[in-house]
Image (cartoon, grey):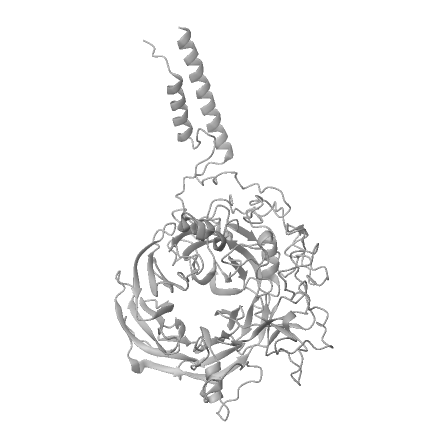
Amino acid sequence: MTIPLSAKTLTASAAALLLATGFTVGGTVPSTSPAHAAEVDDPISFSAEDAQIEMGFLGSHETGQFDESAAEITAVHGDTVFTVNAQAATVDVIDASDPTNPKKVSEITGTGVANSISIREDGLGVIALEDEDKTQPGTVMFFDANDPEADILGEVPVGSLPDMVTVTPDGTHALVANEGEPADDFSTDPEGSVSVIDLPAEVAAPSDSDVHTADFHEFEDGGAKTLPEDVRIFGPTPEDDLPISRNLEPEYITVAGSKAYATLQEANALAVVDIASAEVEDILPLGLKDHGQAGNGLDASDRDPEDAPTVNITEHEGLKGAYMPDTISTFTSGGTDYLVTANEGDSREWGDFVDAARVKDLGEDGLAPVCETSPLKDKLGDEDLGRLNIITDLGLNEAGDCYEELVAFGARSFSVWTTDGKLVADSADEFERLTAEAVPDFFNSNHSESNLEGRSDDKGPEPEALTIGEVGETTYAFVGFERIGGIAAFDLSNPGDPKFATYFNNRDFSISAEDEIEDASDSAALLSSAGDLGPEGITFLSADESPSGEAALVVGNEVSGTTSLYSVADLANGGDDGDENGEADAGGDEKNASADEDAGADQEAGSESDVDTEAGANDNAQAEAGSDSESGADGAESDSGSGASAGSDSAGSSHAGSDTSSDAGSNADGSESPNEADGDPLPRTGADLGQYLILGGIAVGLIALGTAAFFVTRRR
C-alpha cells in the first residue's frame, strides 16, 4: 500500500533535511557557535599587510553598568580573572575557564574603593584600596587567589589614594603608586609617594613593618637632590610645607631590573625608585613633542570649516604636546631594557583651579594672549586650533605676558624610552591616521556616545591602557584607546622603529549608548549591543597562560562595564598558538574567513603600503591613514602617514567598521568585503562554500524527487 505524501509532510521533511545540512528554510545560514555576550555584529579588524598577529573576540562578562567604572584593571591567576569594579567598590572574580562564556562567581570586598590589583605567580593577590576620603592614607589588602572564596589574608597601610599596585617580577615586593590627589575643592593636597612592601615567601600578608615609603622630600628646596627644571610643578599650595612632594602624583609603575619607574603624569616626568632602599633616586623630565615636525600632526578641531576634510591631521609650527603618560611598561631587546608609555595627557580641575583652556579663549578671563610674533597667531579660529585645549602654564614667553608656543595635553601616541629617559621612538600621528582609515565615520569619537570628531579638540583617541606581550618570537605593545576604543598592536622587534601590526575594536558605533540608554526598554541589552567602551586596563596572556590555548588579552572596559577576552592569533604559526578546542580563531567572530599563508594577497584598501615620510605636511590635511585610498570620511583622502603600512588585515577584510550609513563591512574603497555575509557569519565547521552548494544541490534534488513522488501518488 502506498501512503500518499501530503504537502505539509513534504515541507517538514525538506525543512529537516535543510537543517541537517546547515541551511534554514528561509535560506539563511545559522551559526553553530554560541552567542557571545557583548560581541558586536561587525567588530573592526584592521591590519598591516605583513601583520603576523590578528585579534578577535572570545567572550565577555557584563555588569550591565554604563559609565560607572564597573570594569577597570584586570589580573589573571589560572583560569580566573579578577576585575576591579570601582562602581561596586569591589573586585569581581570571574571564571574564564570557558573564555567564550566568562561568568562571575564571587567578589572581594574591602574597606574603601578598589583601584588596582596584582597577583603573584603563587596566587598571593594584592588590591590597592583608597580611603572613603581619598586624601587620607589608603590600604593594600592581600588575598589568596588559589582559594575559590579568595580568603582575605590581611592588609597594611600605604599613602594617600593608592591608584596602582604591581608585584615585582621576582615576587619579593609589591609596589604602590600613591597618587595623592588634591581634595575636590583643592582645600588640601596630600603627598604623592611610592610604597615598597616586602612580601613573605608564602601566600600570606606582610606586616605593617614591611611597608617602606619612597617619598620626594629630598627634591624639596634645600634638599639633597635637585629637581630638573623641566619637571612641571604648578597649581595651588594649600599647605605651607613640601610643595614639590604634594605636587607630584605617581600614576603607574613598571619594573626593570632593580629599579621601579613611576609615571608622574601631570608633571610630565618619570620617577626612578631603587626598590631595595625604597628611595626615589631620580626624576626624569620627558620634554615636549613637536607637532610642527613632519609626521607629528594631529586633528585639533571638532568643528572643521565647511567643505574642508572632516579628518584634518596636520602639523602646526609652534604647537607642542606634553607626553604626560598614564600607563608604563617595559621590555628587553638585545640585552637592553626599554620603557614604553601610553601618552594620554591629563589636566587638573579641582575646585576653582583649572589648568586647561581653549586656544580661542587666550587673551580673555585673565589668560595671556598668543604673542604677535608666534607662528600660531593666525591659527586661532575654530577650524584650526581655536577649539584645542592647551596647558595654561606652559609656552609663555620669559615675561609671562603672552604665549610664544602652545602645549597640548598628551601626545596622542605611545613612546619607547631608555631607562634614563631618552626618547627612542614615538608612534607620531599614527594612532589618528590608522583610526581615520579604520573607522572614518566615527574618527575621534567619544566613548560614551558615538560621534564624529568629538575628541579632536581634546587628546584625540586618548591612549591609556598598555601592556607588553610576546607572541611566538615577537614582542608587541598593545595600546588601548580610551575614547574611540579598540586595541592597537605594534611590533617592537626594532625598539627604535615600532611597526603597526593590527587594530581590533569590538564596538558598534551605530549604537550611541549615552544618547539611547535612558529611554531604552532594556538598558542592559542596549549596552551589550554597543560592545566594549572605554578600555581602561589590559592583561596579556601567553599561549601557556591562556584558557583558550593561544595568546589572549583580558580587557577591562570602564564605560561599558565589560571584562572581555580577545584572542591574539599567531599567523606565523598557522593562525593560532595551539588552540586544541578550535575556539579561539583569528577573527574571534568568524567573520575573517581564514588566516592562512596567502592571507592579505588580495587587499582592497591600503595595498600599496606607500610610506610617505612627509605625511600630513600639506595644508589640506588629508586623512593620510595607510595608503592612497578613500577613507570615506566626507571625502578625506588617505595617504600613508607612518612607518607601518596600515593596510587591510591578513584576511582581506579592511572594512571601515560599523556605521550608521549601512556601509559596515565594506572596504575602504567602498566595495563590499568578500568575507561579509548579509546575515549571521558563516560558522567554521570545516565546510567551505562549495561543500554547502553540493549539499544544497542534493537537498534540491531530494525535494524534486519527493515532489514527483507526490504527484505520481496523487495520479494513482
Which residue appears at 38% of the width and 82% of the height? 213
Question: Toward which corner of the image does residue 83 lie, by quadrant?
Answer: bottom left
Nearest the viewer among 532 and 190 is 190
Residue 200 visible to an observer of this rendering = no
In the rendered structure, the answer to whether residue 205 lies left or right of residue 363 reads left
Q: How many marks?
A: 0
Q: Position of residue 370 (x, y in %)?
A: 68, 76
Residue 665 appears left or right of 163:
right
Determine whether 126 is above or below 506 in the image: below
Q: Residue furthest bottom?
A: 222
Q: Is residue 470 above or below residue 323?
A: above
- In this rendered view, identify the residue nearer to me: 172 or 346: 346
> Residue at 55% across / 49% down in the picture?
657
**How far across and how far down the image is residue 512, in percent?**
50, 52
Of 94 and 257, the residue lying toward us: 94
Residue 586 in the image: above or below residue 87? above
Q: Residue furthest front?
A: 365
Residue drawn at x 57%, y 43% is: 662
Residue 604 visible: yes
- What residue sits 55% from the left and 85% below the top? 228
Q: Position of residue 590 (x, y in %)?
A: 47, 44
Nearer-the-camera pick, 19 or 403: 403
For the C terminus, the image quarter is top left
Q: Position of residue 82 (x, y in %)?
A: 35, 62
**Quarter of the N terminus within the rendering:** top left
